[in-house]
Every structure is written in structure tokens, then in C-alpha cells.
Image (tube, helix red, strand yellow):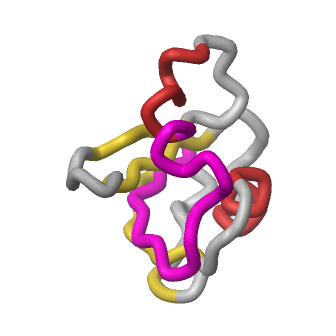
Amino acid sequence: ITAGSPPPANGGFSVFVFGGGTTSQLIEAAGCAAGRGAFWVTNSLGDFVTYVPGTTITAVNAAFNAAFPNGLPSGTPLTGKCK
């Protein structure tokens, strides 16, 4: 996380800028407990796409994975939530 603060681990939202990398690196940087986070980011069309780590429903992350097949670029602003 290069700017802003990660989501509060005990619950709540945060807006932050990710330094770039894989979804595994995003989860680690955010610090949410396993299976307890969700992230929103805009794609190239300006639409919000969702990433929910650990979901078994592939449709949930389909738009995110299509928008960022090789990970998130450096400087990507996100909204995150730990629960």
C-alpha cells in the first residue's frame, strides 16, 4: 500500500493505493484475515469490479480477473473492506 491506509482488520472500509502486484500480494498488503476481505476497483471502462479472495463462486471475481489478468498495476486505487 503506497498511499492511504489498509482496511481496518476488525471491520470497516478504506480507500488506498496499491503498489502493484498479484492478488496474493494485495491480500498480504491489506492485512485482512484469510477469507475476510473484499476489494473494489474500477476497470478501464470506469466500472467497479469486485475481488473477493477465497470465494468458490467464480462469477464473483470474473470481471476483476478479466480486467487484471496479470495482476494490478502500480498505483492502482482500491476500496477495501475487512469483515
Horizontal side of residue 42 vs 33, given as left or right: left
Residue at image location 46% in from the left, 46% down from the top:
67
Task: Residue 65 in the image: state x and y as whole percent.
Answer: 56, 38
Q: Is residue 16 above or below residue 78?
A: below
Task: Residue 22 in the image: state x and y as whole percent.
Answer: 73, 58
In the image, residue 76 lies in the stretch drawn in magenta: yes
Q: Quadrant of residue 58?
A: top right
Q: Is residue 53 above or below residue 48?
A: above
Residue at image location 57% in from the left, 34% down from the top:
52
User: Where the C terminus falls, by quadrant?
Assistant: top right
Q: Report whether residue 11 is seen.
A: no
Residue at image location 40% in from the left, 49% down from the top:
40
Report the front residue among 53 and 46: 46
Query: Which segment is the magenta one?
Result: 65-83
Horizontal side of residue 23 vs 48, given as left or right: right
Horizontal side of residue 82 vs 12, given as left or right: right
Furthest toward the top, the residue is 57
Report the front residue among 83 and 70: 70
Task: Residue 49 in the image: state x and y as whole percent.
Answer: 37, 41
Furthest toward the bottom, the residue is 3
Q: Report whether residue 45 is seen.
A: yes
